[in-house]
Image (tube, rainbow, N blue to C red):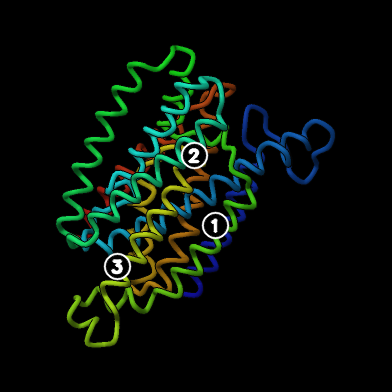
């Protein structure tokens, strides 16, 4: 297992070097000066760090939601937090169509509204909370469609770009995102034993000293906040939180002290690769990174599903 962890970290370093070099023009990271150095260290590196942090946060949130809801198909957007964030982002664009900053603030406020609503339904239990999340997601989607119909034309491109995943206009500082990634990993490690026990069933977990109700509330709040930060930073990026935890469980086993940090790293690696492809495949134009994660994620998840059966 330690060897696999070392290999994963080496893949991160290799991916970072390739991603720095790739783009509209290929640049050698070890021999860059002048304008090339500005492109590498001021443009590409911050964007890659954003991709790493966001991908890791989404993967962690996916792993938590899968345990919280007892559903292997759960992912960070299952309870409608992404939908409420999208509604907030588009609402901000209605007032200031050209402002990415206003859109980010609106997304964060919208995500917190979604979190508050989900917390109200948390007392219903995992099964009913999941059903409530599905209904809420449908409500946010309908409200979003209405707002898009009313949105000024100059804000439509920015709105659709953000909704398909956009790492190029993030207004959240990179140090904050990396700090959030680190805190999320630390919190996950602190909860790892309780999560392992929860997999045995609520009665067994309670018999072994786990306060299941409090654990579920903390886990829901933590996973929702992490999702809100990721969505605010990069828009809606699917399949990272669904595929990566399954892949890490296959590689590292079911113990969360290994699965959670591996998911945080693996999710970052996947989104870095997807973002690199997004800005190189049709350079100088860019593809939506959320579309590429879906293209990568669907066949990978189907492969994992067939392999497990």
Q: Which of the image's four quarters has the C terminus?
A: bottom left
Residue 32 in picture, x, y percent from top left: 80, 39
Residue 98 in picture, x, y percent from top left: 55, 20
Separation (CA) of disc 2 from disc 1 = 14 Å
Q: How many marks?
A: 3
- Compared to residue 142, the image places residue 48 above or below, namely below
Quarter-of-image position of residue 137? top left
Residue at (65, 48) in percent of width and height: 17
Residue 64 in picture, x, y percent from top left: 34, 62
Disc assigned to residue 50: none
Separation (CA) of disc 1 from disc 3 = 20 Å
As helix, strand or loop, the secondary structure at mark 1 comes to helix
Residue 14 in picture, x, y percent from top left: 60, 52
As helix, strand or loop, the secondary structure at mark 2 comes to helix
User: Residue placed farthest to the top in the image?
Assistant: 153
User: Residue placed farthest to the bottom in the image?
Assistant: 208
Near mark 3 (Cα within 10 A), the count class, few <14, some 14-19 or many ≥20, is: many
Disc assigned to residue 180: 1
Separation (CA) of disc 3 from disc 2 = 27 Å
| Callout in the foreground (3, 2) | 3
| Callout in the foreground (1, 3) | 3
Q: Is residue 265 left or right of residue 300?
A: right
Quarter-of-image position of residue 148? top left
Q: Earlier in the sequence, mark 3 or mark 2?
A: 3
Q: Which residue is mark 2?
A: 234
Q: Which residue is mark 3?
A: 216
Residue at (54, 45) in percent of width and height: 51
- Compared to residue 117, the image places residue 284 above or below, namely above
Q: Is residue 194 left or right of residue 307?
A: right
């Amino acid at each position: 297992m330690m060897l696999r962890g070392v290999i994963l970290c080496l893949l991160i370093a290799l991916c970072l070097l390739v991603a720095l070099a790739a783009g509209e023009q290929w640049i050698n990271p070890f021999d860059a000066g002048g304008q090339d150095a500005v492109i590498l260290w001021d443009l590409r590196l911050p964007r890659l760090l954003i991709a790493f942090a966001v991908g890791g946060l989404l993967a962690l949130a996916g792993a938590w939601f899968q345990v919280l809801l007892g559903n292997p198909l759960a992912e960070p957007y299952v309870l409608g937090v992404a939908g409420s964030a999208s509604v907030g982002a588009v609402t901000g664009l209605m007032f200031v169509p050209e402002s990415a900053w206003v859109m980010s603030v609106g997304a964060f406020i919208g995500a917190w509204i979604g979190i508050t609503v989900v917390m109200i339904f948390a007392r219903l239990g995992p099964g009913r909370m999941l059903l409530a999340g599905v209904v809420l997601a449908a409500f946010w989607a309908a409200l979003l469609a209405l707002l898009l119909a009313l949105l000024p034309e100059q804000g439509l491109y920015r709105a659709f770009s953000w909704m398909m995943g956009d790492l190029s206009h993030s207004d959240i500082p990179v140090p904050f995102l990396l700090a959030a990634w680190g805190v999320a990993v630390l919190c996950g490690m602190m909860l790892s034993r309780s999560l392992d026990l929860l997999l045995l069933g609520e009665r067994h977990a309670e018999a072994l000293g786990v306060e299941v109700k409090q654990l579920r509330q903390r886990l829901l709040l933590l996973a929702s906040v992490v999702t809100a930060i990721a969505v605010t930073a990069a828009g809606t990026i699917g399949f990272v939180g669904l595929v990566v935890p399954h892949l890490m469980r296959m590689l590292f086993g079911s113990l969360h002290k290994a699965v959670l940090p591996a998911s945080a790293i693996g999710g970052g690696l996947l989104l870095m690769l997807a973002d690199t492809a997004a800005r190189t495949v049709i350079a100088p134009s860019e593809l939506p990174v959320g579309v590429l994660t879906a293209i990568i994620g669907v066949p990978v998840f189907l492969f994992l599903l067939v392999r497990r059966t």
